[in-house]
Every structure is written in structure tokens, then in C-alpha cells.
Image (cartoon, grey):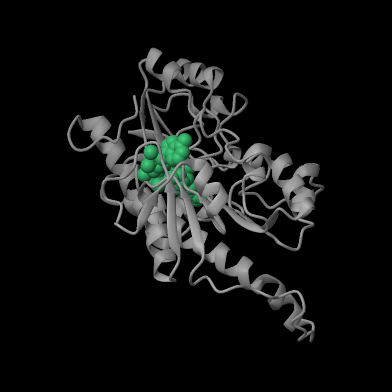
Amino acid sequence: MRIAVFSAKPYDQTFLTLANEDKHHELSFFDVRLTADTALLARGYEGVCVFVNDHLDTSVLHLLHGNGTRLVALRSAGFNHVDLATAEQLGMTVVRVPAYSPHAVAEHAVALVLSLNRMTYRAYNRVREGNFSLDGLLGFDLHGKTVGVIGTGNIGLIFADIMHGFGCRILASDPFPNPDAKAFIEYVPRETLFADADIISLHCPLTPDTDHLINEKAIDQMKPGVMLINTGRGRVVDTQAVIAGLKSGKIGRLGLDVYEEEEQLFFEDLSQGVIDDDQFMRLTTFHNVLITGHQAFFTDEALTNIAETTLENIDAFESGNGTLHRLV
Ligand code: NAI
């Protein structure tokens, strides 16, 4: 089957090519994001394969459908970037990779917690400059602290497990408590979690209910100096509100792997140009903010699983046999 692979970085090409070795689909790699302007590249391809910042809104889906595309294969678990209702209307099949390595994302969230707590990113620069002062690097013991986990699916449960290993008390909020949650996880109302947690980590998907879930009102309810971690989706956090929270000191430390306007920034080398997102640039000025560019998923294991499941999806669509991780 002919597949146009969008947002194809060198690492995507490597892992997808390897997973395709015994399957022999025709994969064409395009470095560009899929937009209304680039959809023409997919003309004549029965399938497209896309990542999180490829925006499949109504107009893009209509263009793809007009090109002859019938299959949209997401290389992600999240699908908030696809208009599923339109895809269904057009009779297009949308598949995803439901879980590729929840460990990768959970462990990255923990990396943000540890780095922010002990300010290792500041210490790294200081030591390289011969500055061995400890002033400004004061952390706290994780042992005995309360961690709030919002969203206890695949990733949230693993994050909770690791933090419990440090000796933390674990509170959780989820409209659908997970039957696999271990006994140490205390499900509480969201307000209780906000009020009691020293560290809050977001592991819910982006939905109308979670859109700007962390807003001014939520931040007001949190403990002074709270640490907030977001490896979920950018729009779960209202950036303006967290900037205000950082300025007032209410938010003591902020770790982000996702950002609400990341589509314009992440996955590209913009270091030769001028970044005109003032909100993002403001975030980078705080010493107690650590941002990574949507790299939580980026492990060898995760990329292998993403590539293999994507190729299995394509196989199953073409042959009508096997597991199709279908959204519509
Ligand atoms: P999952 O589907 O296993 O779990 C999501 C959980 O969130 C479910 O238990 C669900 O009931 C819960 N949830 C839904 N609405 C909620 C709400 N209003 N409040 C609290 N909880 C709510 O998903 P998984 O695999 O654990 O992934 C979680 C999210 O992590 C994904 O949706 C995606 O946005 C993000 N992600 C980020 C990556 C990265 O590289 N930064 C990579 C992979 C996923």
C-alpha cells in the first residue's frame, strides 16, 4: 500500500523503514507538517501517516479524501488533532497507536520533577562556569510529599507507581477511576487534589472538559509553591494563568513537555530565526520553569513500538485481517 508519511523526521524514517522491512509497503517521507497547503503531496496515496502536530481538520480531511486517501494512520495515542466526525462522514478509517510506551512518558515526567526540585539544569551551567555556589539550588525531600495525578490511565498509573516508590502519598482525580489502580492511590475530588498536593502532574487527554483545566481558578486553589508538571497536552494548561501564578509565586516550579501553541515551534530547529511567541518566550525567562519540546515519548522502545503498530495497522487495513487500532 502507498503511504505518505508527514512530519517525517530522520528518526521516524529509520524506525518506520526498519518495521516495514518484511512488509514492503511503499512509504514516501515528507518532512513537512500536513496542512491544507501540503495535503496535495498525498495525491494518489491511499494512506497518510501523521504525528501530533499535523492538523487534520475538516478542510484537510476533505482535501485528502479528494486525493484518494482512505486511511489515516496516527503515530500517536492522542487524537485531539483529528476531526473524527468528518473522517467518519467521509468514510475514512482513522487508526492510532493506543499505547507505545507509557513508561517513556511517565519517566520523563519524573525527570522533570527531579530536575526542577534539585535544579540540576541550573547546576549544570553553574559548574561549567566555575560557579560552585549552592544559593538558589535548594530542593526538598520527595519522601513524605503529596503528589496529585490528574488522569490515571496507562501513563498516570506508572507515574504514580514511581512517585510512590520515592515515598510520596498519591492522590488522583479521574472521572473513570482505573480498576488497575493500586491500593495506595487515593481518588479524591479535583478540588481536594488541588488543595493538598505539593506536586501536580497532568496525564489526562485534551477534551472539552480538560481544555484549560489548569486555569486561574484552579491555581487559586493550589498550595503556595506547588510544582506543576504537564506531559499531557498543551491546552490542558492556560499559559496566561500559569505565567500569572509564577509571577505571584503561587506556582513554585513548572515543568512542561507540551505547550498550547507548540504547533508553531516544536520538532523544528528555529535557533537561526526569531521566535515571535511572546508568551512562550516569557515562560523561558523564569529560572524555575523547565521546558522540553514534546520529547517525553522519545525513547528507543517507544519509537520501535510506534513504528511496528503503525505498520500492523496498515497491514490490517489492507488485508482485512489482524488488529486494527481503529478510532473510526
Ligand atoms: P489513557 O487513555 O490510558 O489515560 C487517560 C486517562 O485520563 C483516563 O483514565 C481517563 O479517564 C482520564 N481522564 C479523561 N478525562 C479526564 C478528566 N477530565 N480529568 C482527569 N482525568 C481524565 O492515556 P495515556 O496513554 O495515559 O496518555 C495520557 C495523555 O498523555 C494522552 O492523552 C496524551 O495527551 C499524553 N501523551 C503525551 C506524550 C508526550 O510525548 N508528551 C506521549 C503520549 C501521550
The image shows a total of numbered marks equal to 0
Image-quarter location of ligand 1 = top left
Q: Who is closer to the viewer here, 50 or 224?
A: 224
Where the N terminus falls, by quadrant?
top left
- On the image, the x and y values in percent for residue 9 come to 54, 50
- The residue sitting at 51% across, 65% down in the picture is 145
Q: Tell me if 88 is positioned left or right of 80 in this view.
A: left
Where the C terminus falls, by quadrant?
top left
What is the quadrant of residue 71 in the picture?
Answer: top left
Up-down: is 193 above or below 111? Answer: above
Whether residue 101 is visible? no
- On the image, the x and y values in percent for residue 165 come to 39, 70
Up-down: is 8 above or below 249? Answer: above
- The residue sitting at 79% across, 52% down in the picture is 247
What is the quadrant of residue 310 in the picture?
Answer: top left
Q: Tell me if 66 is positioned left or right of 95 in this view.
A: right
Which residue sits furthest top? 89
Whether residue 273 is visible? yes
Q: Who is closer to the viewer here, 8 or 217?
A: 217
- On the image, the x and y values in percent for residue 111 come to 53, 65
- On the image, the x and y values in percent for residue 133 come to 78, 84
Up-down: is 267 above or below 86? Answer: below
